Amino acid sequence: MYGDIWKLVLVLLTCINSECHGDDVDSLEFCSFFNNRAPSPQPGLRNCTWFKKNSCCKQEEIDATFGTVKPLPGSSRECQRYTNYLMCYICAPYQNTFYGQEKLTVCEEFCNAWYSACSSSILKGSVIGDLYTNGREFCEKRNFQCEPMANKNCFIELSDFALNRVSGATGVYPVLLVTVSMILTCCFIMKAT
């Protein structure tokens, strides 16, 4: 149990030390999914709201994208949240770091969490957990490229996904720091008991 917690802390610290979405990305933000236009504030977003302050998508584009998607049969609320969150990549202002040549690169850690949340859902008439053995395979069969989070060129918002409504943070650094702090606090509490 402690080994898994420390692995997650190490991955997050590696990400911070390797400057995942570092300061230089701010000057390079552009919307590769939308013909390289610049991101802009979109205060009227009703979905993917964590990108309201700086977004690549507009509400009508979200409506068009999400309007055709139906939940997987038998999917849990958690599975639906992961799927919705993944689809929000079209709004990320730094999408140029993980979307190019009509291909989305998703962090393996996110793929594993998404697979875990959806493994009992039905896809193509079969249970996802029976069709695929892990998150990497699940993502790759969805035609996504799958890379480790340390690569820093993948959809990395797993920690933001878990915390954004609680912390209100929208950037990677604040969320990673909050996540590391929470993990370390839990570790010390568990060790003390």
Image: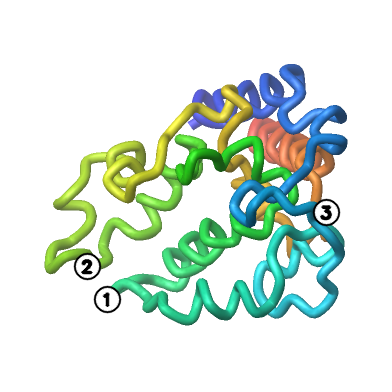
- Residue 102, compared with residue 150, is above or below; it is below
**Residue shown at 80%/46% (left/top)?**
171
Which of the pair 79/1 is nearer the observer?
A: 79
The image quarter in which residue 88 lies: bottom right
Residue annotated with mark 3: 169
Q: In this view, does 151 lie above or below 157?
A: above
Whether label 3 touches label 1, CB < 8 Å:
no
Q: Rounded to the nearest whole Å, what is the CA distance between mark 2 and mark 3?
A: 33 Å
Q: Position of residue 112 (x, y in %)?
A: 41, 42
**Residue drawn 34% across the image and 46% down it:** 143
Tag 1 secondary structure: loop
* In this view, 61 is above or below 31: below
First of labels 2, 3 by sequence position: 2
Q: Is residue 113 left or right of residue 9?
A: left
> Please, what is the three-letter code of the amino acid marked with disc 1?
Pro
Q: Is residue 10 left or right of residue 126?
A: right
Give how far apart the Cα atoms at labels 3 and 1 are: 32 Å
- Residue 14: x, y in percent? 67, 19
Residue underneath mark 2: 122
Q: Mark 1 points at which residue?
A: 73
Taking the spot 73% from the left edge, 34% from the top edge, the residue there is 180
Labelled pair 2, 1 in contact (Cβ < 8 Å): yes
Q: In this view, does 181 lie to the left or right of 107?
A: right
- Assign a secondary structure to mark 3: loop
Q: Which amino acid does label 2 sit on?
A: Ile
* Colouring: rainbow
Cα distance in 3D space between marks 2 and 1: 5 Å
Q: Quadrant of residue 24?
A: top right
User: Hey, what amino acid is under mark 3?
Assistant: Ala
Question: Residue 193, can we see it?
Answer: no
